[in-house]
Amino acid sequence: MGKISVGILGATGAVGQTFVKLLENHPIFEIVSLTASPKWKGSSYEEALKGRQRESFSKKTLATTMKSAAPLPIIFSALSSEDGEALELDLARRGSAVFSHASIHRNRSDIPMIIPEINGEHLALIPTQQKNRGWEKGFIVVKPNCTLQSFLLPLFPLHQKFQLKEAVITTLQSTSGAGGGFELEGNILPYIAGEEEKTEQEPLKILGKLENEAILPVQGVTFSSHCNRVPVCSGHLACVSAKFEKPVDVETACQVLHSFPSLSLPSAPQKPLHYMEDHNRPQPLLDKDLEGGMSVAIGRLRICAVFDLRFTALSHNLVRGAAGGSILCAELAHQKGYLHG
């Protein structure tokens, strides 16, 4: 059986380039179309990058001719809500499975927002979406905010074991999370527009249950976040304090994190969660690339003086938090039979 043809929207940006790099030699998917600004149509990918290249690509990839967006079995979109909403909806209507980066889709009742290890069962909402919108084959699946993976992946198995009630999270987010293009040397920005609202609301949908063709947000769980932009190129770090319904001890919590299972998918890490014993880990410079950037690094698990547990966690915002997370969603959709080649 041949590979499934895919296109990438926004292929020249930081997330778009990460998509291209991760898909160059993918065992299931094959890039047949790269799209960016209309001015680059007909140019090579190398020409379209024009000094913005941050990844090393094969000669074949660099020579790829840039195209206009058109329906394909799979579309990976790195576009913002402003740039991508109408195009993504049109491509889904015309039969494409669209794996989106756009935040505008995340709160729509018939669009699943997926972290595969946590709520892959929410993909069962796809037939409802197709029925609601009159789409025959196409659909949209959206990934959550790129910083959620750093704290929600480790909180999820703890929630399963101890039942999470409250979490206070301080995020230290890299400049590439803003699309790059600016420097933040020697400074920290204590505000990122819309970020705190996303990190407080999106986990409720992800932890929710699919019932009666709708996702019911989890009840009895509250998130409070402080989001900061820091002078780090890539990697989002989260400092988490959490309160649970059931009694918690550090040893059991550590065992829960160690035993969190992997998925049998090409992009899935062997260990989604890596616990580090060193007191000064995880660090973005040292740990963001664990298992190709698809694992979350965790450290400093200890008792919290205010809540129950506290820890620090790190994820690669361009890989696990963006392109790699979307590819993993597509692999899961393929495994579950939602994709048509």
Image (spheres, helix red, strand yellow):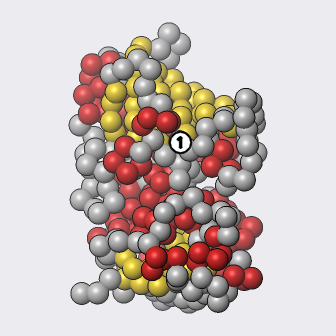
In what quadrant of the picture does the C terminus appear? bottom left
In the drawing, does residue 188 fall left or right of residue 74? right
Q: Dot 1 corresponds to which residue? A: 235
Label 1: how many Cα within 10 Å (few below 14, some 14–19, many 20+): many
Element under label 1? loop
Determine the image quadrant of residue 45.
Answer: bottom right
Could you tell me which residue is drawn at 64 percent across and 77 percent down? Answer: 47
In the drawing, does residue 322 fall left or right of residue 227? left
- Give the image location of residue 186, x and y in percent: 73, 29
In the drawing, does residue 280 fall left or right of residue 224? left
- Give the image location of residue 224, x and y in percent: 62, 32
Q: Residue furthest top?
A: 305
Establish if 29 lies above or below 13: below
153, 315: nearer the viewer = 315
181, 337: nearer the viewer = 181
Could you tell me which residue is drawn at 37 percent across and 83 percent down? Answer: 4
